[in-house]
Amino acid sequence: MANEQKPPKNTQRVMCVADLPQARSERRIEIQNGSEKPSVFTLKDRKRQITELLMQGPVYCASPVRISDVVHILKREIGLEVETRFYPGDKDTGAGDYGVYFLNSKVRLLDTVGVAA
């Protein structure tokens, strides 16, 4: 069921890999959900890209890059809180309702992971 008429103007659409943040190397992040104690995780590759994308603002769920798969993994594996809000499609054209991801966790990028010299 749709809960609003239109998503925020800053909602990001991912049409190809080039639309994702480009950094893929390991990066430590701190996640805090509500009043819980913050947790630190190391992310790389697509998990890092999707986390940083969500940090930038809301994201349309439908994507040819399959961001939904990664969002599900991040929610399940590290407890990232991501809310899906639904919006009405254009009934005149037959377009169905659609979802937008909103990051609810507080996420902070920490130092990059590296090897000491």
Image: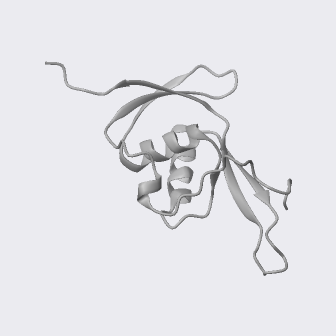
Q: Position of residue 98 (x, y in %)?
A: 73, 64
Snapshot quadrant of residue 68: bottom right
Q: Is residue 49 left or right of residue 6?
A: left
> From this viewpoint, is residue 77 visible?
no
- Counting every numbered tag in the picture gives 0
Q: Position of residue 74 (x, y in %)?
A: 52, 45
Q: Is residue 5 left or right of residue 37?
A: right
Query: Which quadrant is the N terminus positioned in?
Result: bottom right
Q: Is residue 35 left or right of residue 18?
A: right
| As drawn, 91 above or below 99 | below
Front residue of this view, candidates 18 and 4: 18
Residue at 51%, 38% in the rendered image:
78
Snapshot quadrant of residue 61: bottom right
| As drawn, 73 above or below 44 | below
> From this viewpoint, is residue 71 visible?
yes
Q: Position of residue 51 (x, y in %)?
A: 51, 41
Query: Which quadrant is the C terminus positioned in?
Result: top left
Residue at 67%, 46% in the rendered image:
10
| As drawn, 41 above or below 47 | above
Residue at 18%, 19% in the rendered image:
116
Q: Position of residue 58 (x, y in %)?
A: 65, 46
Q: Is residue 27 left or right of residue 92?
A: left
Most extreme residue toward the front is 9
